Image (cartoon, rainbow, N blue to C red):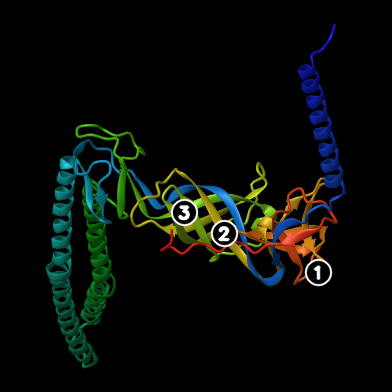
Amino acid sequence: MRISESAFHGIYGRASLFAALAFLTACGAKKEAEAPEAPTPVQVEAVRKGPIDHVITADAVLFPVNQANITSKINAPVRRVLVNRGDHVKAGQLLIELETSDLAAQANESKSQLEQSQAALQTVTGATVIEDRNKAQTDVESAKQVLDAAQKVYDSRVALQKQGALAQRQVDDSKVAVVQAQAAYNTAKQHLETLTNVGQREQVRAAEAQVEAAKAHYENSSVQVGYGKITSPISGVVSDRPVYPGEMPASGTPLISVVDTSSVVARANVPVKEAAIIQVGRPATITGPDGDISGKVVVVSPAVNPNTTTVEVWVQAPNPDGKLKPGGTVHVAIKAETLQDVTLVSSSAILNSDEGGQIVIVVTPDNVAHQHKVNIGVRQGINVEIISGVNEGDKVVTVGGLGLDDGSKVVIKEAPAEEDEDEK
């Protein structure tokens, strides 16, 4: 088969073109293979010395700073309830009234008994004792007069008997009368002393004891009546009100619950090792749905929870707007201590090693990257404490280090300047 001249030239031209393209491609590949690898652009920062806060973080549950589940000290029907759930109340405010008509009647009866005992005491100290003592005094005086008269008769008869004008028998009778009068006088005198020294004191004591007993009974009855008015022991918000008028609450059942949410306490379980460096009074931050609130540590439990091997730490913070709700979950960050003059790098300089652990890439003055294994200490925000592996002043890669091989050539690029707010 014969090929036309035009077809022959077409085939020859295409073959020449393919050969030329193949030659050029081979030459480009050779030149590319022979060209040196371009340095990798990176951004670096200098390793520095400075302070860093050792911040311990944990999840926590919120509790009110104070709460009261108020119960009744008496069993009585509910007369009326003056507050509802969600109401703000003050300490001492009346919340619930109970039915206390029967207790009020008992108090009135006790008051009457007190008044009677007081009147009896007045009678003992004012009238009865004085009359008895006056009568005893009169008896003493009368007995003394009888004794004196009997003594005079006896003395006269003794004189007459000595003169022989009177028989001995009459003298003996007079002597007996003197002895009897002396005995009557002694008895009257002793009775007066008894009334003065013992009787009056004992009668007054007995009357006073009756007054005190009646007074105590009246005060107890009055207190029982007062228990019918249920007041709030704290200022806060009514969180629960399970009773209604007419009900008879069971003994010990809370009638109303009040919580003080002006401050909240976040209770966190912290590992033992970290809790060992936390002290009461250290600053802390509670992070909730609406942002951060500053607080401080108020309790570090002295005991370890055997189930979780953690220590409970309380962080208290003000909650004036009531945004933090008791029972909610928050995050706490406790500034346990401040470490001074430690070696610091940015967290972006820390990379994970293929062999395990962490590394940083140090750029030497000849712009060669070298991988250094490091031991990490405290982290705070973007700052990381380096315990070992680098020295102050070393330049470590912060951008561009991922996938960079040890010994690679790099070129240091300046970080792009942030745009001014007016230019954004």
The amino acid sitting under disc 3 is Val
State whether residue 294 appears in this view.
Answer: yes
From what the image shows, is residue 13 above or below residue 45?
Answer: above
**What residue is pinned by disc 2?**
334
| Residue that extends furthest to the front in the rendered view of this protein | 5
**What residue is pinned by disc 1?**
365
Which marked residue is nearer to the observer: mark 2 or mark 3?
2
Residue under the point 65% across and 49% down: 310
238 or 217: nearer the viewer: 238
User: Residue 20 in the image: x percent, y percent?
Assistant: 82, 34
Q: In the rendered image, which quarter is residue 41 located in?
A: bottom right
User: Residue 208 in the image: x percent, y percent?
Assistant: 24, 64
Q: In the rendered image, which quarter is residue 157 located in?
A: bottom left
Lower sequence index among marks 2 and 3: 3
State whether residue 355 appears in this view.
Answer: no
422 or 239: nearer the viewer: 422
| Cα separation between marks 1 and 3 | 53 Å
Q: In the rendered image, which quarter is residue 1 located in?
A: top right
102 or 404: nearer the viewer: 404
| Cα separation between marks 2 and 3 | 13 Å
**What residue is pinned by disc 3?**
265
The amino acid sitting under disc 2 is Ile
| Cα separation between marks 1 and 2 | 40 Å
